[in-house]
Image: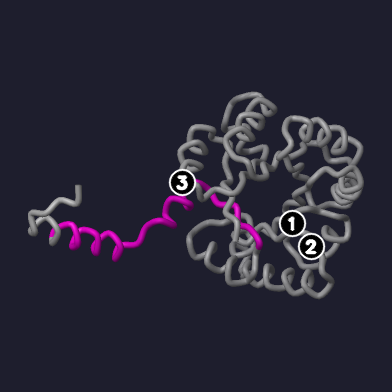
Amino acid sequence: MQLFLDSADVTMLKDLAATGLVDGVTTNPTLIAKAGRPMLEVIAEICEIVEGPVSAEVAATESQGMLAEGRKLAAVASNVVVKVPLTREGLIATHAFAREGIQTNVTLCFSAPQALLAAKAGATYVSPFIGRLDDYGAVGSELISEIRAIYDNYDFDTEILAASIRNPAHVTAAAIAGADCATIPPPVFKTLFKHPLTELGLQTFLSDWKKTGQSIL
């Protein structure tokens, strides 16, 4: 499963991209607002940090406006993926983008029928929001399993990008359910490296090694 970072914090992205484990980046209007900088400038800088897909979201709500904004965003760099909402207008724009060879990430997906429509429209990625579904008493990972089954049944090329990841358990559930990718907030990404038994084991090994008085170098 590919791991994306859900952030527009350029400093943070540079730091975590240095691990070699970051496959892409997703942004949204909220994250861009937090960055406090011009959107196109931020997206261009992120595209230089990571070679993989970088999702940049349109602000328009009608298809023609989405198309105009999306074309401008796509022109920023070759790895920009235009992010559109899963609405009727968004899918009209997605279909047009697909014909133009512009990659898309259809976001705010909360049902399998929505995901089916996104795939039929030619979306490159569809983003089911599993954390928000959990907040409403549903099981977000079950939606990923449903989408996976539908896409496999019909050989759709659209990739499932698990979003609204809140914790490491969400990452595990998304991977088990068959998501192609997961977009993860940097604080959650950092927790993936950690386990108390790992830390304890390392302390024990280092302590025992020190007692030997040896040096590898």
- Residue at 57%, 35% (x, y): give it: 49
The residue wearing badge 2 is 115
71 vs 21, left or right, is: right
Residue at 73 percent across and 59 percent down: it is 159
Query: Which residue was labeled with disc 1?
Result: 126
Q: Residues within 10 Å of mark 3 (few under 14, many from 20)?
A: few
- The residue shown at (63%, 62%) is 130
Q: Tag 2 or tag 1, which sits nearer the N-term?
A: 2
- The chief SS type of the magenta part is helix
Q: CA distance from mark 2 to mark 3?
A: 32 Å
Element under label 2? helix
- Relative to 67, is 112 above or below? below
Q: Which residues are magenta?
A: 180-207
Q: Residue furthest front?
A: 217
Q: Which residue is mark 3?
A: 19
Left or right, residue 176 beside residue 123: left
- The answer to which of 145 and 50 lies nearer the viewer is 50
**Which callout, 2 or 3, points to the residue nearer the camera?**
3
In primary-sequence order, the first of circles 1 and 3 is: 3
C-beta proximity under 8 Å, tags 1 and 2: yes
Which element is circle 3 on? loop
At label 3, the amino acid type is Thr
Question: Which one is nearer the viewer's eye here, 180 or 56?
Answer: 180
- Up-down relation of residue 106 to residue 51 (above or below): below
Would residue 204 be counted in the magenta stretch?
yes
Q: Are marks 2 and 3 in contact (CB under 8 Å)?
A: no
